[in-house]
Amino acid sequence: MKVAITGGAGFIGSNLTYYLSEERPDWKITILDALTYAGNLETIEPLLGKINFIKLDIADREAVTNIFATEKFDLVFHLAAESHVDRSILSGEPFVRTNVLGTQNLLDASRAHGVGKFVHVSTDEVYGALGPTGRFVESTPLDPTSPYAASKAASDLMALAVSKTFGFDVVVTRCTNNYGPYHFPEKFIPLFITNALEDKQLPLYGDGNQIRSWLHVKDHARALLMVAERGRKGEVYNIGGMEEAELPNRLVAEMICERLNKPKSLIKYVEDRLAHDRRYAIDYTKINRELGWKPEVHFQKGLPETVEWYVNNKAWWTRVKSGAYLEFYEKNYRNRGL
Ligand code: NAD
Ligand code: TDX
């Protein structure tokens, strides 16, 4: 079985690659990744030799076509994306380029060159924001509020349209917020852990009462394998965290301070994100009923383990936090008084 993982040098893609190398050792895995600021070869270095790596910009149509014509993949996990909401507020263009055009290129090349199944990895953010009650189900209308989420919604619809039009075997997954090792420290949990380790302020947006539903990245990887092997063609599957992991950002920030023995006074309330979604929560009944998946890692255990991982892997995140990332940090947080 020849398997392509796009975005495999990023957070979820690398965790998925580690998981699949253990669970399906006979699969021949190739990572396709442009190595943008968010992609890091160091993350997957221990696997090189066992898996292949090809540097590829999925928005480069000719390059995508050539690689798919040569490699003849059986299965594609598509995770490559511009993934940070704050960056999409600064500029939407790279999001349309990678998330929409890039996905279209992959769908076309997959269809033309014999791919049997295409797992399109998407997000609960395509549904927009929830009020204090209720959960997103697969039929909830799409109502994205950021350029990132809009670009993901567009790519979901293209993927589903290709399935409907041509009968191509595409499955779309929509997952809630992930956390775990190798999470890029521009995102909330790793940013707060690494800033706290450096005794820097923790910029909490707005009133800090926005609720996110947290899922350990390993639970996500397990769901993606099930969907790839048993998910039904043309279907959408929501993937979500446990109810106990639906928490306001303020509380998660405090848990991080407590775990690291740092004063909560490091938390600084700063200007809110534009159109900041108030609450996400996923109803994962469908994937549970059809494929038997449910989240297994409790946040009370997964968060401290993740904090430990950052404590023990300082070399990884200090390198990641230097260079191009600093330019974005300056732009995003300067006007918020940090
Ligand atoms: P990430 O930003 O950590 O990694 C993205 C990867 O894609 C990087 O390795 C990057 O180099 C690569 N990439 C970006 N543009 C590319 C291009 N033009 N061509 C080839 N590769 C390119 O992202 P992540 O958090 O691992 O998210 C992976 C996928 O999962 C995304 O599609 C995202 O929308 C989705 N998702 C993420 C979360 C989350 O909580 N992080 C939740 C639900 C869904
Ligand atoms: O500095 C910050 N301060 C802060 O209060 C940052 C970066 C975030 N936040 C808040 C905003 C959100 O309410 O924390 C929450 C989480 O923020 P992010 O880590 O940026 O994640 P979110 O916007 O929820 O999106 C994430 O989950 C869904 C991923 O980045 C997406 O790729 C995924 O689709």
Image: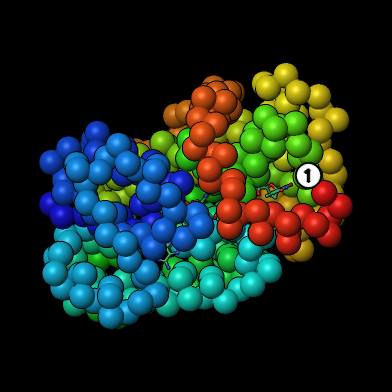
Q: Which residue is mark 1?
A: 204
Q: Percent from the top left, x then y, of residue 39?
A: 44, 53
Q: How many marks?
A: 1
Q: Is residue 210 left or right of residue 61?
A: right
- The answer to whether any part of residue 134 appears in the image is no
**Colouring chosen for the image of the structure:** rainbow
Query: Residue at horizontal 32%, vertical 41%?
Result: 45
Image check: 172 left or right of 136?
Answer: left
Question: Does the numbered disc 1 mark a residue whose Cβ is under 8 Å from ligand 2?
Answer: yes
Q: Is residue 248 above or below residue 95?
A: above
Q: Position of residue 252 (x, y in %)?
A: 70, 33
Q: Position of residue 174 (x, y in %)?
A: 47, 55
Quarter of the view holding residue 79? bottom left
For the point 46% across and 71% down, the residue is: 98
x%, y% of residue 240? Answer: 51, 44
At 61% from the left and 73% from the top, the residue drawn is 92
Rendering quarter of residue 14: top left
Q: Is residue 180 above or below residue 91?
A: above
* Of the pair 164 and 336, the residue shown nearer to us: 336
Question: Which secondary structure lies at badge 1?
Answer: strand
Can you see residue 274?
A: yes
Residue drawn at x 78%, y 44% as measured from the top left: 204
Picture layout, residue 116 above or below residue 50: below
Q: Is 250 displayed left or right of 100 in the figure?
A: right
Nearer to me, 42 or 189: 42
Task: Using the image as rendered, state which of residue 280 and residue 1 is in the foreground.
Answer: 1
The three-letter code of the residue at mark 1 reads Leu
| Corner quadrant of residue 164 | bottom left
Disc 1 residue crowd, few under 14, some 14–19, many 20+, Cα 10 Å? many
